[in-house]
Amino acid sequence: MSMYIMVFLRIMLLVSLAFMVFDFLKVEQLFIQMDRGFIDGFEVYITRWPGYIAMTFTALFVIANLIQLFRVWKNKRSVMNAFLAPEYDVSDERAVQNTHKAVSLAFAVLLLYAFLIIGSYMYIPNYFVDYIWYPLFTTASIPIVGLLTYLITYKVLQFK
């Protein structure tokens, strides 16, 4: 259950950060359009909830990491050097092996997905001027795909 919580917290942290940056990019795009003479003026309304959500998920993520680090430190059987992430029990050798396999596959999927996403930017350069959300959210999806691959692979290996 803690693995689902930690992966969810990481994904929500990335999504909330992307929404926070999106608001900034919208304002920046309007300034560029005004500078080029496409528009005469504009009004800006920046929502605060993405920032609040990002700070909340950051705090929850840090608290969960500190709790797990304290648990690992108190457990005499656990290897402190193996504490990579709070998702798994470092005292369990099978969990360490499953994590190694899951991270390896997630890294391979991450490299392939990043290659495809970055390659897609080549085909739609004019799209970025009008729709700034595409490069932002596709770039933010790269670590999310890696995290989901890690979670699914780990759970499949765990139930074998």
Image (spheres, rainbow, N blue to C red):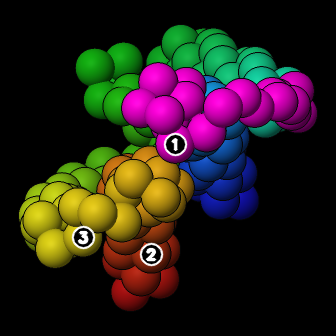
Quarter holding the N terminus?
bottom right
Q: Is the residue 140 above or below the residue 51 in the image?
A: below
CA gap between label 1 and label 3 equals 21 Å
Which residue matches tag 2?
152
Q: Percent x, y for residue 99?
A: 31, 55
Q: Earlier in the sequence, mark 1 or mark 3?
A: 1
Q: Nearer the viewer, mark 2 or mark 1?
A: 1
Residue at point 75%, 32% (across, down): 42
Q: Which residue is mark 1?
A: 38
Circle 2/circle 1 CB separation < 8 Å: no
Q: Main secondary structure of the magenta part?
A: loop
Which is more toward the observer, 84 or 38?
A: 38
The label number, if any, that marks residue 128 in the structure image: none
What's the magenta region?
31-49
The answer to which of marks 2 and 1 sits earlier in the sequence is: 1
Hey, which quadrant is residue 50 in on the image? top right
Q: Is residue 35 above or below residue 108?
A: above
* Residue type, mark 2 in image: Ile
Q: Residue placed at 82% from the left, 30% from the top?
A: 43
In the visual, does 100 lie left or right of 3?
left
Q: Which quadrant holds residue 61?
A: top right
At label 2, counting other C-alpha atoms closer than 10 Å, the crowd grade (few under 14, some 14-19, many 20 or more) is some
Q: Nearer the viewer, residue 111 or 44?
A: 44
Q: Tell me the element at label 3.
A: loop
Whether residue 107 is visible to the viewer of this picture, yes or no, is yes
Q: Nearer the viewer, mark 2 or mark 3?
A: 3
Instruction: For marks 2 and 3, give the CA distance.
Output: 32 Å
Q: Residue furthest bottom?
A: 160
| Quarter holding residue 56 | top right
The answer to the question of whether label 2 and label 3 lie on touching residues, with beta carbons closer than 8 A, is no
- Give the side of residue 9 with respect to residue 139, left or right: right
Label of residue 124 in the image: 3
